Amino acid sequence: MSGAISDDGYLLDNRMAVAGSRLEALGAIFDATTFRHLDALGLRDGWRCWEVGAGGPSVAQWLARRVGTAGRVLATDIDVSWARGAEGSGIEVRRHDVAADEPPAETFDLVHARLVLVHVVARDQALRSMVRVLRPGGWLLIEDADPALQPLSCLDPRTPEEERANRLRTGFRALMVERGVDIAYGRKLPGLLRGVGLTDVAADAYFPVALPACALLEATTIGVIRDQLVEHGIATVEEIEAHLASVRAGRLDLAQPPMISAWGRVPED
C-alpha cells in the first residue's frame, strides 16, 4: 500500500507490513503497565473479557492465561490480521468497529481498550457501547495517549538531529488532528467515565522516556506515515532518511506521549 491512510480513515494503517513491528514496540512499551492495571482490578479465573481494538495478540493472550479455561476473551478490531495469532485457547477474534457496529450480544466482567478511542471520531458512542455490555460490578479500563501534554520526541533538544525529530513529531501530530484524533483525550478520561455512570473512577499516567522500544516505535511509525509526511510537505525524503539513520544509530533519547489509564465500574445496584 502506497499511502499511510487506510480505507477506514486511520492514519496508522495496520495493514502495512511494518505495522507488525510497530505493534510489537507498543507492546514492549505499554504491556507491563496495562497488565499491572488489569491485575489491580481483580482479574481472575472465569472472567469474561472484551479486548477492544486488539491490534496485536499480546494483551488478549495475557488475559486468556489469567481467566483460564472457565473464562472467555473476545478480541476485536477493524483489522484483525495481527490479532489472529491469538485465536484459540479461550480467545475469539472477531472483526468489529466499536464506533459503528452494535456491541457484542453478551455481557462482560471486563472491557479494555488501549490507544483506541483517541483515534475514533465517534469516540463518545464507542465508549457508551463498551459500558452497555458490562455486567453490574464489571470494570472498564481505558488507556489513551495525550500527545498535547507532552508533544516532543526529544525532551532536551540540543542538536540539529533532535530539533529535526521534534519537527517530525509536530508534523505527525498535525496529521493526527486532521484525521479527527483528539490529542488531548487522555486527560479527559476520568470525567468521561464518571459521565457514563461508572463509579470508583481513578486514573494514572505512564510516561515512556528513552526506552529501547521507543526507538523501534519511532522507526516503525515513521515507516507507516512517511508518504503522508512527504505529501503534506512536512519533511523531504532525505530528511526522513536522515532521521531514521539517527534513530538506528541510537543518537536520540526518544520519548513517547504519556498514556493515561482510567478505570471505573458499573454500580452493583
Image: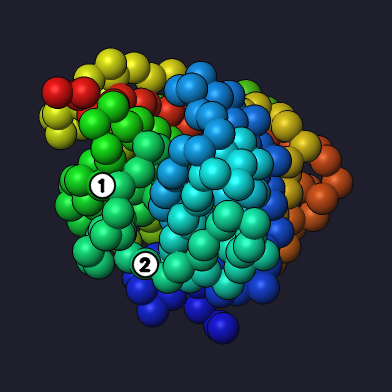
x 78%, y 48%: residue? 246
Residue 224 point in image, percent of width and height: 58, 66
For the N terminus, the image quarter is bottom right
Residue in front for this viewpoint, 180 or 100: 100
x 77%, y 37%: residue? 212
Residue in front for this viewpoint, 169 or 140: 140
How crowded pointer 2 is (Cα within 10 Å; few <14, some 14-19, many 20+) is rated as: some
Left or right of 155: which side holds 97? left
Residue position for label 1? 133
Residue position for label 2? 96
How far apart marks 2 and 1 lie (CA) works out to 15 Å
* Colour scheme shown: rainbow
Residue in front for this viewpoint, 22 or 126: 126
Residue 154 point in image, percent of width and height: 62, 33
Relative vertical location of residue 75 with respect to residue 124 in this rendering, above or below: below
Of all residues, the one furthest to the bottom in this rendering is: 1
Residue 156, quarter of the rendered image = top right
